[in-house]
Image (cartoon, helix red, strand yellow):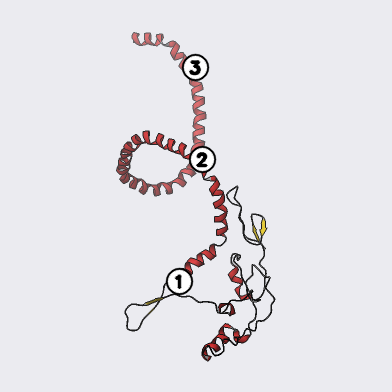
Amino acid sequence: SNRVFATTAQRSAEIQATFKALPTFEKESSTTLKRLSKFSANANPVVTDLRPAAKELSPTLVQLSALAPDLKKLFSDLNPLIDASKKGLPATSEFLDQLHPLLAEFDGPLKQLNPILDGAGLYKNELTAFFANSAAATQASAAVPGSAEPAHYLRTSNPLNPEMLAQYPKRLSSNRTNPYPFPGDSSSLPTGLASFETRQCTGQTLTPTLGPAVDGLLPDTLRDGILKYALGGGNIAAPPCKQQPRFDLGGTLTQFPQLKASAKGVEAGAPQP
């Protein structure tokens, strides 16, 4: 007992400090417990909402445990790649540095190419129709009596009009031409296509005939067929004469499309009346 009292006497200062700090500790503990109680009350709804997600996550974690060996092997196999990258990455950086001057040389050609591609993009429907019609026209076939192999033929038609039969000294008033049609111009075929040049347009009805030099040279059946189908029975109504509006590409109005070098990659726009 004497030893106990002796030890207590030696540590009286520490015991005294403990009793002095005890009220502060109790006060701080009380504040902390209040905050923990408030936090638990606020966190309880969150924990409740997370329970369904935790249940759904459990199968994922189970499957992840099966995937873990493969992932471990993957990371192990990455070591040679990491070792190779110590030389490969600097070489790649050097290659990219040397590539910069080459890419700069593409700026000029691309300024010329971009407007061309942009202008061609206006006719995407016509380009699609061209390839589709080409395939449809060249893939036709028909059964041949007495042969196991079908006969392939070309689906095509030729216009039949007075200009297909003879060469005229000047353009007929019924002639309509347009080497630069607007995108979607074919949709106006029922009401008449727009023309690039209309100087010869008069709106007159043609009355073509077969001259006397032809009389007696052609069989009557062929002559009558030409008069009926190619010459319209001697009475051909001229198509409507409509002047095509000018193109508006890059803010410049021209009778035919003209593209300028692009400073920003795109300058050509849709043609406007």
Residue labelled with disc 3? 20
Percent position of residue 217, x then y: 53, 88
Identify the residue shown where x is 51% and y is 22%: 24
Residue labelled with disc 2? 42
Type of the residue with mark 3 = Lys
Q: For the residues marked 2 and 1, what is the alpha-carbon distance in whole angstroms?
A: 71 Å
Q: Going by the image, does 12 lie left or right of 146?
A: right
* 10 Å crowding of disc 3: few (<14), some (14-19), many (20+): few
Identify the residue shown where x is 56% and y is 62%: 123
Query: Closer to the camera, 107 or 234?
Result: 234
**Marker count (numbered):** 3
Identify the residue shown where x is 37% and y is 48%: 60
Secondary element under disc 1, as helix, strand or loop, is helix
Mark 3 / mark 2, whichever is N-terminal: 3
Type of the residue with mark 2 = Asn
Query: Closer to the camera, 213 or 54?
Result: 213
> Residue 83: which quarter of the image?
top left
Query: Closer to the camera, 263 or 157?
Result: 157
Query: Closer to the camera, 214 or 87?
Result: 214
